[in-house]
Image (tube, helix red, strand yellow):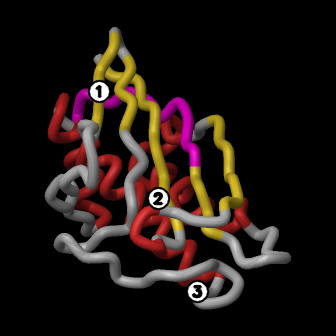
Amino acid sequence: MTVSERLADLGIELPAVVAPLAAYVPAVRTGNLVYTSGQLPMVEGALPQAGKVGADVSQEEAKDLARLCALNALAAVHSLVGIDAVTRVVKVVGFVASAPGFNGQPGVVNGASQLLGDVFGDAGAHARSAVGVSELPLDAPVEVELIVEVV
């Protein structure tokens, strides 16, 4: 089954690529790897929720937003090489805008990791970092970047 077929089976449609906020591109290929820029949880050009996780945004809401970030990252990959070229997810880096005392970053970034597991199966198992930060662009609660291997 191709990745496109798996997405269809899951009822997932990749969104349009999010326009960069500054001087960068959404994804770059070097050799057999594609690196995405950090992706915010944008939906149709807008941030659905803003603020710090653990204060303005619950951990469960942030987990859903991390899933959106991963979808946007997959859209960036798809726009560059086509989603069916992905052979495995190598690494996920998640940034969580955290209120003082919030230390549930790994649970938040699980939103991205679980989506990738659902889409890619065993090839979605990846190395990962989940980092708490004080601020993200546009006051986004979460940002996710991917490194994937492609054919």
Q: Give the range drawn in magenta.
A: 84-93
Side of 14 where 144 appears, left or right = right
Q: Depth check: 46 or 124 in front?
A: 46
The answer to whether residue 2 is seen in the rendering is no
Distance CA(mark 1)–CA(mark 3): 31 Å
Find residue 70 and report its horizontal and vertical position in percent.
41, 55
Distance CA(mark 3)–CA(mark 2): 20 Å
Where residue 138 sits, quadrant-wise, is bottom left
Instruction: Tell me, for residue 115, which label it has, or none.
Output: 2
Where residue 80 sits, quadrant-wise, is top left
Side of 69 where 29 appears, left or right = left
Q: Residue furthest right?
A: 101
Majority secondary structure of the magenta segment? Answer: strand
Q: Which residue is drawn at 59% across and 37% down?
A: 126
Query: Height in image: 109 above or below 31?
Result: below
Query: Height in image: 3 above or below 111?
Result: above
Find residue 134 and report its horizontal and vertical position in percent.
66, 65
Q: Specify the amino acid type for callout 3.
A: Val
Instruction: Tell me, for residue 28, which label it has, or none.
Output: 1
Neighbour class for label 2 at 10 Å: few (<14), some, many (≥20)?
some
Q: Earlier in the sequence, mark 1 or mark 3?
A: 1
Q: Specify the amino acid type for callout 1.
A: Val
- Quarter holding the C terminus is top left
Side of 143 where 98 appears, left or right = right
Instruction: Tell me, for residue 56, which label it has, or none.
Output: none
Q: Which of marks 1 and 2 is nearer the N terminus?
A: 1
| Residue indicated by mark 3 | 57
- Given this view, does label 1 or label 2 mark the residue nearer the observer? 1
Q: Which of marks 3 and 2 is nearer the N terminus?
A: 3
Considering the numbered disc 3 on the image, is that residue within a helix, a strand or a loop?
loop
Q: Specify the amino acid type for callout 2.
A: Leu
Neighbour class for label 1 at 10 Å: few (<14), some, many (≥20)?
some
